């Protein structure tokens, strides 16, 4: 075997090991209480050399369990136990790989607004809002949804919304009487999704995990609301495209830039550059997993562990929260 051959064989072995580990971590950290089916699929793949060999033919970011599973489901993979889905996956691999190559995980979860809305309300009763990594823009409508914080309701000024975002809370969450009014809203995304496009809507629906029927209902109800007044979304990169959008924001009202569940997709140096520059453009609310913004993690009373999420204002932690906004633990002070 030539030196190059040996090198690439070692690289392949390393790729297989890392991919197996990715599926193992996904199963252990992300699926508990969320999807037994995805836990079963991920558990099957992590020890299945034949399927792992197919997956590593994709570029590294495209090997993500969530992306492979959603691409397979979009193409009709049976919602069945791993041995059945394995046969399907092997037979349909070229189509699954092609789908994964043109798609990205763009899960749009309005429930994350349970963590963001009280901070927005503290900034002002009326705000202008820009979302970075907006997906289809469902998080740009905090004023159109109802909220339930461990039994305490917050409804829009004109009455309850068909979309109820619920969070289990601890600590002194400062709840307003009504969500703040959003006078102007816009979003930026590498690949904005259009709530009026059936193909985009189907992808958003497929990104909801199989057993999550309540999430699916919430997604469909939020889509109904947003479809009546679709947001202004521009295609662009968080790392460089924000200033042009900021220039269009109205004056005389606080501009708030929100970045829920997006900075993780940026290279660490780009995240730092974003965090350094964004507060010169407006107030900044972010919602991120442990390790994404070390400057925020460093200020938490306890070091976060994988799976923990924090919502922050202008780089300072405000609350711990669930990845999808299902819990909110307000930090003292
Ligand atoms: C997990 S989704 C979150 C969507 C939305 N913020 C939410 O919380 O529901 C991440 C979104 O960020 C977008 N994205 C990833 N990297 C980006 C970048 N460098 N610049 C702009 N958007 C990006 C993706 O296309 C995707 O729509």
Image (cartoon, grey):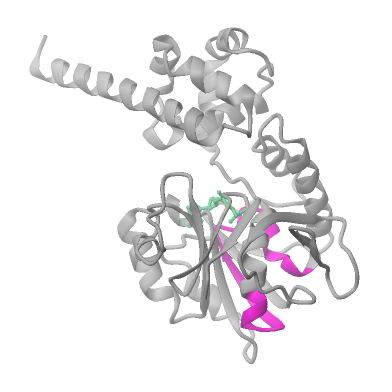
Determine the residue located farthest toward the left in the rendered image: 3
Residue 291 vs residue 259, the one in the foreground:
291
Q: Is residue 72 visible?
A: no
Determine the residue located farthest toward the right in the rendered image: 159
Number of labels in the image equals 0
Q: Does 125 sit left or right of 171 as displayed?
A: right
What residue is shown at x 14% (from left), y 16% (from top)?
Answer: 6
Pick the quarter of the image with the N terminus: top left
- Place residue 76 in its image quadrant: top right
Q: Is residue 131 magenta?
A: yes
Give x and y (percent) for residue 64: 47, 33
What residue is shown at x 63% (from left), y 70% (from top)?
Answer: 172
- Place residue 300 in its image quadrant: bottom left
Q: Is residue 208 visible?
A: yes
Please give the range of residues in magenta.
Answer: 120-143
Give x and y (percent) for residue 291: 37, 53
Residue 29 vs residue 287, the one in the foreground:
29
Give x and y (percent) for residue 185: 67, 72
Residue 53 vs residue 291, the one in the foreground:
291
Give x and y (percent) for residue 34: 63, 34
Is 30 placed above or below 315 here? above
What residue is shown at x 84% (from left), y 60% (from top)?
Answer: 228
Q: Does 20 sit left or right of 172 as displayed?
A: left
Q: Does 313 sit left or right of 298 as displayed?
A: right
Is 119 placed above or below 67 here? below
Determine the residue located farthest toward the bottom in the rendered image: 252
Q: Is residue 65 magenta?
A: no
């Amino acid at each position: 075997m030539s030196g190059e051959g040996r090198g690439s064989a070692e690289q392949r072995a390393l790729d297989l090991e890392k991919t197996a580990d990715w599926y193992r971590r996904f199963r252990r950290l992300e699926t508990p209480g969320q999807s037994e089916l995805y836990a079963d699929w991920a558990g099957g793949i992590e020890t299945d050399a034949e399927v792992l060999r197919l997956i590593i033919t994709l570029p590294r970011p495209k090997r993500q369990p969530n992306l492979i599973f959603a691409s397979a489901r979009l193409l009709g993979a049976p919602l069945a136990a791993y041995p059945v889905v394995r046969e399907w996956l092997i037979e349909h691999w070229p189509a699954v790989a092609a789908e994964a190559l043109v798609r990205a995980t763009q899960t749009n979860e309005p429930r994350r607004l349970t963590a963001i809305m009280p901070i927005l309300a503290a900034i002002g009763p009326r705000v202008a809002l820009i979302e970075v990594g907006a997906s289809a823009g469902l998080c740009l409508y905090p004023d159109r949804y109802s909220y339930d914080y461990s039994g305490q309701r917050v409804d829009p000024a004109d009455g309850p919304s068909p979309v109820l975002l619920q969070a289990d809370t601890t600590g002194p969450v400062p709840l307003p009487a009504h969500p703040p009014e959003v006078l102007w809203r816009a979003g930026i995304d590498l690949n904005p999704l259009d709530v009026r496009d059936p193909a985009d809507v189907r992808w958003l629906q497929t990104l909801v995990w199989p057993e999550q029927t309540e999430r699916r209902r919430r997604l469909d109800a939020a889509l109904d609301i947003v479809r009546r007044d679709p947001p202004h979304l521009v295609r662009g990169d968080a790392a460089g495209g924000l200033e042009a959008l900021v220039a269009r924001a109205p004056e005389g009202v606080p501009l708030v830039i929100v970045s829920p569940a997006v900075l993780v997709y940026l290279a660490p140096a780009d995240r730092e550059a974003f965090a350094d520059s964004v507060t010169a453009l407006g107030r900044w609310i972010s919602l991120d997993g442990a390790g994404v913004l070390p400057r925020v993690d460093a200020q938490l009373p306890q070091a976060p562990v994988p799976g923990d999420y924090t919502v922050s204002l202008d780089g300072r932690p405000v609350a711990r929260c669930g990845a999808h906004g299902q819990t909110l633990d307000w930090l003292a002070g």
